[in-house]
Image (cartoon, helix red, strand yellow):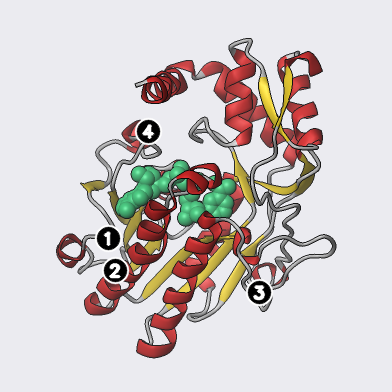
Amino acid sequence: MTQRVLVTGGAGFIGSHYVRSLLGGVYPGWEDAEVTVVDRLTYAGNPANLEPVGGRHRFVHGDICDPDLLRTVVPGHDVVVNFAAESHVDRSITAAAEFVRTNTLGVQTLMRACLDAGVTKVVQISTDEVYGSIDDGSWDETAPLAPNSPYAAAKAGGDLIAGAYAHTYGLPVSITRCGNNYGPYQYPEKIIPFFLTNLLDGRAVPLYGDGLNVRDWIHVDDHCRGVQTVVEHGRAREVYHIAGTAELSNTELTEQLLKAVGADWDSVERVADRPGHDRRYSLSDAKLRALGYAPRVPFAEGLAETVRWYADRRGWWEPLRAAAAKGASG
Ligand code: NAD
């Protein structure tokens, strides 16, 4: 049976990878899926991310906080996967309201529309950051939410409201929580594409604080396969972790990026730490693995491929960096 899939935030980094995979026939049995993308096209949403599948999906330029729009778009879809979010922690520190709007109110508006339309599978995409920071060990899905940044708090709000729609109204929604993603088409503000594009231009990179904050990295392709596993086999009202494959401090990551582009530590500037910077995130993914999922992309391979992609695709990121520089000076 042809599945009709609505992907919100499908013009961003991870959502567009999911759409390209779905329409590229990567998920067996879903080759004929009909896909609609709803995206507000913020600075992070980029129609160029969907060019490889141009014309094979329906694109709706719109906001998940707009109930009238959702009332016209959501009916007729079997599956809704919500990637739409404000996603950059640094921006949430200077402009939190937009994060609460999209990451919490937007989720409520979308859940309501899914309920009214009788959608049979909803997946809310979330993050390990909702748990706060952990010095040792890993969180499982029962860990209490203790978010620290406005980004993480607003995502936790979205998760809680999605859970409430499952509990109160029986909406068939599952939640996925993932670690730090890397890969092609990531807007050049997060550490890997920001550092890479700086280094490729011969510029310095700013390393926060003592550089010892630890993140668990996952290739975007593994994240999206984890999401698809939950779309196909996940249970409603359940949370599933999609863990990374490489736990690295920012110093270790910087070392690998410098090496990959032939630069050295002279290109690194130490800068004041991010306020409230979480020290470490770590997820246990045993629950998702029990559904048949396992990550496939070894970090060294995925990073080398990502470095090549940014080196070869200046035409994708140079306009984004130029627009950001203009915005900053304007
Ligand atoms: P992104 O910033 O690259 O993309 C977000 C997309 O959402 C953009 O296309 C943007 O235009 C769209 N959008 C923003 N507000 C919207 C609104 N109100 N209505 C409709 N569309 C809107 O983010 P990403 O890195 O692709 O992250 C996708 C999801 O995955 C987010 O929910 C994020 O919290 C989650 N996540 C990301 C990471 C990561 O490392 N990037 C890790 C774990 C979880």
Rendered position, 128 above or below 109: above
The earlier-in-sequence mark between 4 and 1 is 4
Does any atom of ligand 1 lie closer than 8 Å to the CB of label 3?
no
> Disc 4 marks which residue?
52
Image point 70% across, 66% down: which residue? 285
Q: What residue is shown at x 36% (from left), y 57% (from top)? A: 102
Q: Nearer the viewer, mark 4 or mark 1?
A: 1
Label 2 or label 3, whichever lies nearer to me, is 2
Taking the image as shown, residue 52 lies to the left or right of residue 135, namely: left
Q: Along the polypeptide, which appears first: circle 2 or circle 1?
A: 1
Disc 4 under 8 Å from ligand 1? The reply is no
Q: Which mark is residue 141?
A: 3
Residue 313 in the image: state x and y as whole percent. Answer: 49, 19
User: For the residue marked with disc 3, what is the amino acid?
Assistant: Glu
Image x and y of residue 155, in percent: 49, 62
Q: Nearer the N terminus, badge 4 or badge 2?
A: 4
Kind of residue at badge 2: Thr
Q: Which residue is mark 1?
A: 65
x 48%, y 75%: residue? 160
Look at the numbered disc 3 and give the secondary structure of its residue.
loop
Q: Nearer the viewer, residue 311 or 27?
A: 311
Q: Nearer the viewer, mark 1 or mark 3?
A: 1
Q: Relative to 95, does residue 310 appear above or below in the rendering?
A: above
First-in-chain label (2 vs 3): 2
Would residue 26 be visible to someone looking at this image? no
Q: Quadrant of the N terminus?
A: bottom left
Mark 3 and mark 1 in contact (Cβ < 8 Å)? no
